[in-house]
Amino acid sequence: MSKLIVATLAAGVLWSAAPGDHPDNPPATYVSAADILATIANAPEGRVSDQQIRHIDAGGHNAGVGVVQRPPTTSLGAIQHHNQTEVYYVVSGRGTLVTGGELSDARALDPEGNTVRTLTGPSSVGGITGGESQEIGPGDMLIIPAGSPHGFSEITETITYIVVRVDPDQLVELK
């Protein structure tokens, strides 16, 4: 994994407004390659791991960066974030991501639950009816707009990706 790509991705997305516009905010939030690699190394094996590294007030919206790791599967479960956009950068592994379509058998996540409060904001889970499948692997990036159902229909080898989350309603806890 290129440290330059990771540092550029994290710095570019987490860059906040000019310090004069928001005197309490720093001009940027640094997420080192060491922080990202340590988060990847500490992910538990054999299960889904979604770990937020930083989540900041970026001047009118919040922005966060974390690491998600998912083990091999052939079961399609999906999530739809009501207001939060996500950007994925695949570090390692391969899978087929389904996006779009309609969330079927939707059930809202607990608004007071850890996932909603610290990661995704208001979201629902279920299956996907329709949608588009895309095979993804190392170096690929995806932008998943708020409201777009998404989930993996197959993961052939454990997939690890950096996720950048844009929280326009500033609902997710800062870190």
Image: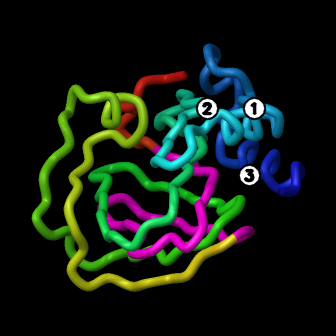
Q: Are marks 1 and 2 in contact (CB under 8 Å)?
A: yes
Specify few, some or many for label 1: CA neighbours under 10 Å numbering under 14, 14-19, or 20 or more: some
Q: Which one is nearer the viewer's eye here, 164 or 93?
A: 93
Q: Nearer the viewer, mark 3 or mark 1?
A: 1
Predominant secondary structure in magenta? strand
Measured from the top left, where is residue 28 in percent x and y? 74, 31
Side of 76 where 97 appears, left or right: right
Measured from the top left, where is residue 84 in percent x and y? 39, 49
Dividing the picture into quarters, in which one does residue 10 lie?
Answer: top right
Side of 81 where 14 appears, left or right: right
| Mark 1 vs 2, N-terminal side | 1
Q: Disc 1 residue type?
A: Asp
| Mark 2 vs 3, N-terminal side | 3
For the C terminus, the quadrant is top right
Residue in the image at 61% along x and 32% along y = 53
Q: Which residues are magenta?
A: 138-166
Magenta run includes residue 29: no
Q: Disc 3 residue type?
A: Leu
Dividing the picture into quarters, in which one does residue 75 lie?
Answer: bottom left
Identify residue for label 2: 53
Magenta run includes residue 151: yes
Element type at mark 3: helix
- Give the residue at the far front of this rendering: 46
Q: Nearer the viewer, mark 2 or mark 3?
A: 2
Q: Which one is nearer the viewer's eye here, 135 or 171?
A: 135
Identify residue for label 3: 9
Q: Disc 2 residue type?
A: Ile
Disc number at residue 35? 1
Residue in the image at 49% along x and 77% along y = 96
Side of 51 where 77 appears, left or right: left
Q: CA distance from mark 1 to mark 2?
A: 8 Å
